[in-house]
Image (spheres, rainbow, N blue to C red):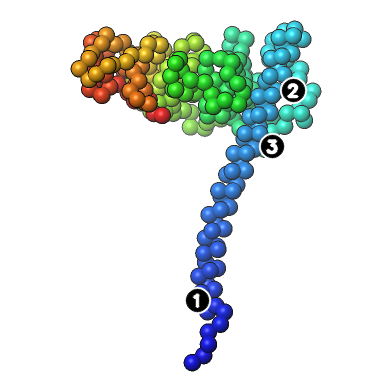
Amino acid sequence: MRKQSGFTLAELLIVVAIISVLVAISIPVFSSKLDRAREVTCLANRRSLYSMVCADYLSGDYPSLEAAFHGIYDNNKSEFPCPSGGTFSWVDDGDGKGHITCDKHDGSGGSGSGDSGGDSGGGSGDSGGDSEGTTYGDTDIKVQDNYWPKQSDYDSNIYGNITVHAGGVFQYTDGNYYIVVRDTSLTKSQAASGPGPSSETCAYGWYNTEKMTGRIITYSDDNEHKDVHRGDICQVGDDYYVFIDGEGWVYGPTVESSRWYKIPN
Ligand SMILES: [Zn+2]
């Protein structure tokens, strides 16, 4: 009997096949991590630029935030680079507020209401730049500062309509908080009219967005019912529900589940 040593051809082929599969899987994962890293760096640079803009505006060097942005950025572009080669611009949000966008990374850098960025952030105010974003009231509900479509979203979207997804909680420019209660495809004019009760958004789909009332309802047991208004929030364990039906004496989400919309965690 011949003594076997080393690998057979079949074994070698199997090893080569496994290695090719691993390489094929790891390359896309690696490059998407790189993209994410570039995006985060871009965001960090926009945030630091935004802080400088605010500081220089507050110290009276410029008549507006936008003027401060141009004063600083236009002359020192290399100090605030986007790793993907993007260029930053100032977007006016009205009321003298604004935020910084990157033409390669779309999301906002810093906003007039405080911290914001990427897929979360913003909301009620001056939270730290590196936090996960702000929350709604005394809850763990995340406020998504960039949830409601802006003009620039339409400019960069060749299909025209922008979908906002159910569960998105955001603060609109009217200062109020809203939640999207079903996936909604918005035309530019629907988005421009805002999420409020008199807007086109509500007129064509009454329950698409709901304004938070600021009330947090709690129930002591399943037999209890309370005077509840559309937009009230109820907490059950770690979950939050918003009341989306007509107001009245209502049981909690565990009993009248169809009248409450669970906000995704
Ligand atoms: Zn960028």
Q: Is mark 2 within 8 Å of ligand 1?
A: no
Residue at x-position 32% and y-position 15%: 218
Q: Is mark 3 within 8 Å of ligand 1?
A: yes
Q: What separation in Å lies between label 1 and label 2 (alpha carbons)?
A: 61 Å
Tell me if 247 is positioned left or right of 175 in this view.
left
| Pointer 1 local density, CA inside 10 Å: few below 14, some 14–19, many at least 20 | few
**As drawn, which residue projects farthest toward the front?**
220
| Mark 2, residue position | 73
| Amino acid identity at mark 2 | Tyr
Can you see residue 80?
A: yes
Question: Depth check: 203 or 54 in front?
Answer: 54
Can you see residue 231?
A: no
Question: Depth check: 101 or 189 in front?
Answer: 101
Q: Nearer the viewer, mark 3 or mark 1?
A: 1
Residue at x-position 22% and y-position 22%: 255
- Find numbered disc 3 in the image and state the secondary structure of the residue it sits on: loop
| Mark 1, residue position | 10
**As drawn, which residue projects farthest toward the bottom?**
1
Tell me if 15 is positioned left or right of 46 in this view.
left
* Mark found first going from the N terminus, 3 or 1: 1
Q: What separation in Å lies between label 3 and label 1 (alpha carbons)?
A: 46 Å
| Mark 3, residue position | 83
| Amino acid identity at mark 1 | Ala
Q: Position of residue 8 (x, y in %)?
A: 52, 79
Residue at x-position 36% and y-position 16%: 233
Residue at x-position 50% and y-position 70%: 14
- Find numbered disc 2 in the image and state the secondary structure of the residue it sits on: helix
